[in-house]
Amino acid sequence: MVDPKHPDLSVRRQCFMLDLNRSNLYYRCIQRPDEAELANEIHEIWLAMPSYGYRKITEELQRRGCNINHKRVLRMMRDMRIQAMYPRSKTSISNREHTKYPYLLRELTISQPNHVWATDITYIKLSSGYVYLVAIIDIFSRYIIAWSISNSLETDFCIDTLEAALSTGKKPTILNTDQGVQFTSNTWITRVENNSIKVSMDGIGRWADNIIIERFWRTLKHEHVLLFCFETIKIARESIGRFIDSYNHRRLHQSLGYKTPAEVYLT
């Protein structure tokens, strides 16, 4: 073992005798921040400052004492599918040949449950890849009526979720979506219109048009998904199911007069 304080041999001589590179003598292992903790912190900064891109978020992390570079922050933000001002995941892929419908919620007063439903798709990270979560929310009460997880972005799992929502015996006057190919498909539009439901769609790039379900995605990820590492789709489905049940029946909402979504929706 090299002893820098040896009275007879210099550090250079000791390294030479041991055939050891001197730079290794002074190396100190830098512990990388935990990936889950970093993801939570990045998401926290982005929620507070949604206009921040990866460079500003990197600067903020460094101000907080985190040893990280902008390349890693950019990679993680891409994995989390968040970006400055436009927190829309790439689950919304448009098809130019599909008919687009106007946005019907602008200046609309939503005064009761089942007036307007909204639906959207987001990603859920597993330890070995991604799966996709679709949910249907009642805008007035914030109640999650139906949801489903799939390992693909096929339209079928969105249709199944819509069927589950309609099987409750309730239906909205308006159903709002983005312009993703799943929600502009003939299968989806036909199923919605056959139930005498009006179709409403966000403008391109206007994530704020569907802000209620966007806020639910943020709540789900910030308070649950980013705190865990799901090994399988089965584990993710069970864990998220427990969170949504708690969200519906136990989580108080200030905007609802400190009631739960279920208390507002079911009464």
Image: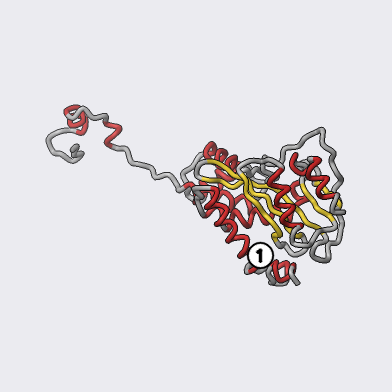
Q: Nearer the viewer, residue 45 or 166?
A: 166
**Point 30% across, 32% down: residue:** 23
Q: How is the image coloured?
A: secondary structure
Q: Nearer the viewer, residue 101 or 223?
A: 101
In percent of width and height, residue 58 lies at 55, 43
**Point 68% across, 46% down: residue:** 157
Amino acid beneath label 1: Asn
The quadrant of the rendering that contains the N terminus is top left
Q: Is residue 22 left or right of residue 145?
A: left
In this rendering, is residue 29 above or below 169? above
Quarter assignment of residue 250: bottom right
Q: Which residue is at the far left?
A: 8
Q: Is residue 25 left or right of residue 88?
A: left
In percent of width and height, residue 163 lies at 74, 53
**Point 49% across, 48% down: residue:** 231
Quick one: SS at disc 1?
helix
In this rendering, is residue 11 above or below 113? above
Q: Which residue is mark 1?
A: 248
Question: For the residue carrying disc 1, how many other residues have a C-alpha within 10 Å: few (<14), some (14-19), or many (20+)?
Answer: many
In percent of width and height, residue 87 lies at 68, 46
In percent of width and height, residue 236 lies at 55, 52
For the image, the number of numbered tags is 1
**Point 18% across, 39% down: residue:** 3
Q: Nearer the viewer, residue 12 or 243?
A: 243
The quadrant of the rendering that contains the C terminus is bottom right
